[in-house]
Image (tube, grey):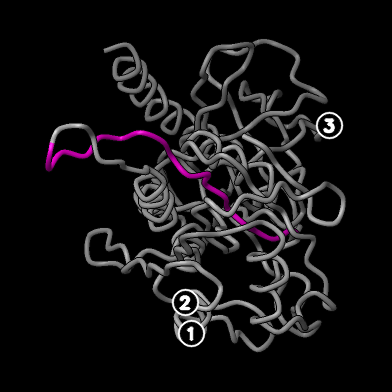
Amino acid sequence: MIVIRYGQDALPYDKNTVLTVGTFDGVHCGHRGIITRMLEASIVHRPSSIADQRTPDDRRRTVVVTFDPHPQIVLQKPEREPVKLLSTIDERCEVFEQLGIDMVVVIPFTREFGATPAEQFIRDVIVNGIGVSHFLVGHDHMFGKDRGGDETLLQRLGPECGFSVEIMPPLVCGEIVVSSTKVRNALKDGQVEEAEKMLGRPYSLKGRVVRGDERGRTIGFPTANIAPIDEHKLMPGTGVYLVTTVIDGVERVGMANIGVRPTFTTDTVPTLEVHYLDVDADLYDRELTVFFRRFLRAEQRFDSKEALLAQLLDDRNHATEFQFTFNHRSTS
């Protein structure tokens, strides 16, 4: 897959392109439905020598146009709560490549770019810059200045600019129409399994292991204190989780605490620390990706170190049971 940085790299023009535009935060199941349909629409059929039969002969290029930073971060008002995202641009591109997309065009989003009228964006960037024969977007997607890029505009410009338009219906997971906002809300509430259903994979957070106060080591539960690498990445709600991380090529199970550690501190900013089962390696200064698998319990304050230790032992029993199930599933 080719990644093009708009404004830095040359745009390879190809009229025979199936294209979509969006932020695709999290690349959730709804987004994946769009990508799957793009790949289907990219297949070109030509009549064979046998009457009434058509066989795949070629395919059109598939292109995703997305933005970095996320438009909400750039356009957000100072008085509002900072926007937290489900995925970095690198994570989005990684999923696009796994799904089989040919090219991703990353547009650096600025306030100036955000003021571009939608029609000008379609004509200058999409039609004349990248090339498009089939334009596919989600049912509720709008883009451009004042969100003027919608189905009506695309249907009007399509015949004039030589592209067809396809609007994807909403994707329902259970009884929920999947959206990035709903995934974020699930994670904020600690509902990591619900988030996994909507994402189509476990939610993950990458961070660097930093020095902590090492209190866990003194009671037999050493932890890796993990500082998120991207400040805009969403951290799930406070609580204790069962997690997995690949360490030295082996997927390890751990029990993660997100919170302010009320038994020991009066901090108000949540941190992430993980106790990994059967890991003795020095993890300091290493980058680890934590996959959130299960919510175990809410964070709580304990009146004594003994009460805390008893709870941690119970948590570890749950983690050990999960490890057995997880390892059995991975090898079956």
Q: Residue at x 54, y 42 (%)?
A: 96
Residue position for label 2: 159
Q: Residue at x 64, y 11 (%)?
A: 248
Could you tell me residue 20's position as x and y percent? Answer: 52, 60
Foreground tag (2 vs 3)? 2
Q: Quadrant of residue 117?
A: bottom right
* Amino acid carrying mark 3 in the image: Arg
Residue highlighted by disc 1: 156
Task: Say if the magenta span includes residue 252.
Answer: no
Closer to us: 113 or 274: 113
How far apart are the two marked residues, 3 and 1, measured between alpha carbons?
58 Å
Secondary structure state at the residue bearing disc 2: helix
Label 2 vs label 3: CA separation? 60 Å
**Earlier-in-chain disc, 2 versus 3:** 2
The residue where tag 3 is placed is: 211
Residues at discs 3 and 1 in contact (Cβ within 8 Å): no
Please tell me whether residue 60 belongs to the stretch shown in magenta: yes
Marks 1,2: beta carbons within 8 A: yes
For discs 1 and 2, the disc positioned in front in the rendered view: 2
Residue 167's place in the image compared with 153, above or below, is: above
- What amino acid is found at the position of numbered circle 2 in the picture? Pro
Work out whether 158 lies above or below 300. Answer: below
In this picture, residue 105 sits left or right of residue 187: right
**Looking at the picture, how far across and down is residue 181, in whole percent?**
49, 68
Q: Is residue 108 above or below residue 147?
A: above
In the rendered image, which quarter is residue 85 located in?
bottom right
Residue at image location 27% in from the left, 63% down from the top: 172
Quadrant (top left, top right, bottom left, bottom right) of the N terminus: top right
The quadrant of the picture occupied by the C terminus is top left
Q: Position of residue 290 (x, y in %)?
A: 58, 35
Q: Residue at x 75, y 14 (%)?
A: 282
